[in-house]
Amino acid sequence: MCNQNIECYQEIAENLRDVLDRFIPYLHTANLVGTAGMASDLDSNVDEDEICRMAFGEVEEVLSGIEDGMTSYLENQLPLQGVVWKQLCQLEKEEGRHQQHTTQSLRGEKENLIKQLLDYKLTTAMRAFDTTKRAFFLSWMRVKLEVAQLDKLSHLRGTNEEWMQEPCIGLEHFLREMVLVYERYFSGPKSDLYDMFRLPYVGAELLLYGVPLELYDGDASVFPMNWVYSVLYEVYKQLPKFSRMRVLKILGFHNSKNAEILSAMFGTNFLKWGMRHIKGAYVLLLSLPGNLRMEMDCEFLMLIDTEGTPPRNTGNLSKDDGAAKEKPKQSWSKNARLRNASQLNGFKVKTSHFALNSKSKKTLKYNKNVAQRFTNNLIEDCDKRVSEKLKHKECYSDSYMRELLAILDKGLEVLKGESFMMNPKFEAGIKGYICSKALVSFQEVQQLLIRERETKERFLNETKDRHILNFIYQFRKRHQCQKAAQSFINLCFKPTAEDFIYSSLERQIFDDMLQNKNARLYSSPKKFHYGLLKEMLLKDSFENFHEYLQSDESFSQKSIENFIRAHLSGSVMIEDRREQRMHQIFDWVKRCIKQASESSSGAQSNVRLLLEKVCISLESLGKMTMPTQILEEPLFDISTHREYFLADLQESVSVLSSIAQEFMENEDVIEVPDDLPNKLEDMLYDRVKRCDKRCPFCKAPCDLEEKEHKVHEAVVHRPKGLVCYTNANSTTLSHNTCSADIVGQN
């Protein structure tokens, strides 16, 4: 039966071989891209779509120039992995071995290399690599780079030495370039860098997608601590909450095929160059299927693999071991070591691991001390600012938190200038702690303000009616005080002040008018009338002479009135004198009010008694009489607070003073004498007034100046026809005087 089956299989194979031999010569070869186009022409569904084609174009853009040679592409597009970086790593290892004997030349050479790395500008390939779509882009990158590697390996089969030294580009070179760009951020200026804080997120996405994360560069012997921490922190944020993770790490010898073991166990793919895996340490994150999660008691499995550790016969035990270990919080670590090594070699490996861990611990200790000192100072500054805000006891405002964040940002900028490796978790943690602490303080003050406001509102609601009644009572009381003060000023003080001001003006104006030439004119009635007749003669005005003859008394009064008007229109003495007297009496009344305030005792006083004290003091200062009978009215018979009433009285005096000042500035000086008690016209007329007796015939006035004379005499009698005598039978004016007719025969 078995022989028959074998013969059947052989027959089928021969038939297939014959068919292929007939059809192969007629077939056309096509690459992978070409088959996609053929499938589209045949209306066949393939997994290539528009996004996949866009990713292929982006891969072509990133790998543009690789056909010119691997070495040229590495130098132009991935320059950070060149000779400068390797020299810097070698110097750092030398510096680590001889920390106490570091020379000045070694430090200068290191600074020069760092300066060369800081001049790096992001290349076109890295810009496109950081911003493209992940899934299709990485698949096409793997395909293109593997094809390039196979082509390169097919030409390097000559000698093994040439094969090992010839460079080739893989996906790990782009990832390593991204790591170096990020690490450069912590040692160079922060202003001209290209979106550095986005790179850990990209690395976390690649790790979750299945791309191994390089923990340790086997060629340069470098452990990028900032990069590894930032990427793992991003992974921690992207993983579901309360998820569990186990870590499986394999630390083998240089010839241990750890990656092949993990690939066989979990189906993983680590980075390879030809038939061997690339030297270094890598971490890979796996999401376990549902049937294994219960068995392994976790949802995620992190694999840590080391490749190319130093051989057993090496004499340099200080060389970096290439094994890195990263243990996330609340994870279980299991070391799956190979058991075929001797105890001595295991001790050497552990010693090398201990050296690396000691160096890391020193760095972490330094960072911890710097962070603690900086955090204490920053918390102290923020506490001072919060205390200043709390002193004012104001309601909370969002601007308070913005001020605290500004202080934190300024402090973090200062910290970045030191040799301190800051991570986003530290920055977020310190901001969260300080803001939460300040928020608690602000909330306590806010609650205190709310309680105080509620207490005040409750107190006001309880005493509202009482306060309203008290306010109404005090308002009415104050209104009575103001009314009493205004009434006293208008009814008592104002008339007295007017009498005091104008009583002295009468004699002052009269004496001023009788100065110089006017003194002789108004010295006697005869001289006054002589002056009038002389003036009429000079003017040659018959109307004035006729008016004088008709009534010399009214003509004299009219002349005196014109004289006073002309005198007052050209004199400023009255205004000055009146202003002086007004200021004098207002100063007196203010002084009397002040004396009444100082002499009284007790808070409550009777208004009438206070005003009587003011009137007595004012009468004692000047020759004036206050009408105190007005104070007997009921308006002034009230008791009130002494200071309040005197303040109202003082205010009323000030108002009256300003009104009087405005009145004097706008009043015409000529109208002032009408307000005087005795008119100036009467005073001057009494000085030049003659005897009232007249001649019964010609009406000539008596010219005798003696006050008490019994015989009346006129110096010149008037003609009979001049004033009152007429003759109907004659048309001529009679020139005879009454005195001539009496002496003569008639």
Image (cartoon, rainbow, N blue to C red):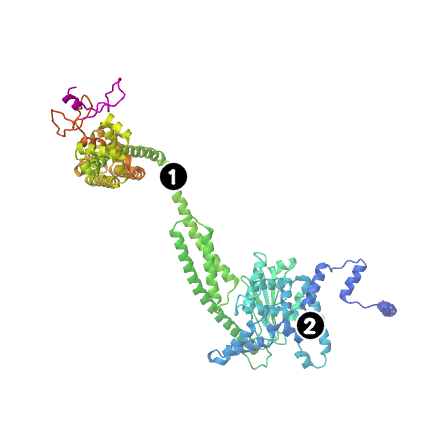
As drawn, is 13 to the left or to the right of 560? right
Q: Give the answer, above or below, for where 680 lies relative to 115.
A: above
Q: Quadrant of residue 200?
A: bottom right
> 583 or 414: nearer the eye?
583
**Disc 1 marks which amino acid?**
Arg
Q: Which residue does the image show at 67% across and 67% down from the upper left? A: 62
Name the quarter where the N terminus is drawn.
Answer: bottom right
Residue at the spot 70% in from the left edge and 64% down from the top edge: 57
Numbered range of the magenta stretch: 717-746
Q: In this view, does 411 lie above or below 615?
A: below
**Residue lying furthest top:** 729
Residue 69 pos. (x, y %): 69, 75
Q: Mark 1 points at which residue?
A: 458
N-term-proximal mark, 2 vs 1: 2
The residue positioned 32% from the left and 34% from the top of the image is 475
Q: In this view, does 526 lie above or below 33?
A: above
